[in-house]
Image: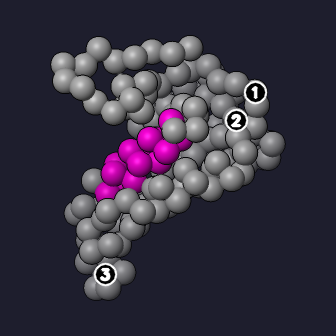
């Protein structure tokens, strides 16, 4: 299913087509595609180049890991997300490596990395449904 945003001003096609589905193909995601998706996140800008994001990834082929991540979701999301071919838990390192001080930009940086991950996924025709 395709949904295009009704924008006020022109935006890139990847952003115009982005939406958060609750139904997914049963087809596994190719490892090379997944690698590129996380490579895009890795190259996101971050405060002091700290790259505080961490991604815990579980493909549906790994029943145990996929089930564990699915178990972290609230029931309303678990109902549909359990069918996703890949689940990703986004977490952050909350202190700077160079001095141990709190990194107040960590959530912003995670958001930027997740946005890049999402756009790279969209370039492959893969849809992402972020949940808080």
Residue 104 vs 28, above or below: the answer is below
Disc marking residue 26: 1
Stretch of the chain drawn in magenta: 109-122
Residue that carries the numbered disc 2 in the rendered image: 85
72 displayed left or right of 59: left
99 displayed left or right of 22: left
Q: Residue 102 appears at what percent x and percent y?
A: 26, 71
Q: Helix or strand or loop: what does disc 2 sit on?
A: loop
- Mark 2: few, some, or many residues within 10 Å (few <14, many ≥20)? some
Q: Residue 120 appears at what percent x and percent y?
A: 49, 45
Of pointers 3 and 1, the one earlier in the residue sequence: 1
Q: Helix or strand or loop: what does disc 3 sit on?
A: loop
Check the picture and name the quadrant holding the N terminus. top right
Asked if one can make out residue 67 in the rendered structure from this viewpoint, the answer is no
Foreground tag (3 vs 2)? 2
Frontmost residue, 22 versus 67: 22
Of pointers 3 and 2, the one earlier in the residue sequence: 2
Q: Main secondary structure of the magenta part?
A: helix
Residue 97 vs 61, above or below: the answer is below
| Residues at discs 3 and 1 in contact (Cβ within 8 Å) | no
Spatial distance from mark 2 to mark 1, Cα to Cα?
6 Å
The image quarter in which residue 68 lies: top right
Residue displayed at 46% across by 41% down: 118
Frontmost residue, 124 versus 103: 124
- Mark 1: few, some, or many residues within 10 Å (few <14, many ≥20)? few
Asked if one can make out residue 26 in the rendered structure from this viewpoint, the answer is yes
77 displayed left or right of 63: left
Frontmost residue, 130 versus 91: 130
Of pointers 2 and 1, the one earlier in the residue sequence: 1
Residue 105 vs 49, above or below: the answer is above
13 displayed left or right of 25: left
Residue that carries the numbered disc 3 in the rendered image: 100
């Amino acid at each position: 299913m395709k949904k295009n945003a009704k924008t006020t001003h022109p935006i890139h096609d990847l952003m115009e087509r982005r939406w958060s589905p609750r139904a997914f193909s049963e087809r596994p995601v190719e490892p090379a595609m997944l690698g590129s998706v996380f490579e895009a996140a890795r190259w996101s800008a971050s405060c002091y180049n700290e790259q505080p994001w961490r991604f815990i990834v579980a493909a549906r082929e790994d029943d145990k890991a996929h089930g564990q991540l699915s178990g972290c979701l609230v029931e309303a999301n678990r109902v549909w997300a359990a069918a996703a071919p890949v689940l990703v838990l986004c977490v952050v390192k909350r202190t700077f490596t160079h001095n141990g001080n709190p990194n107040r930009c960590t959530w912003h940086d995670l958001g930027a990395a997740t946005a890049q991950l999402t756009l790279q996924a969209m370039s492959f025709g893969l849809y992402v449904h972020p949940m808080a």
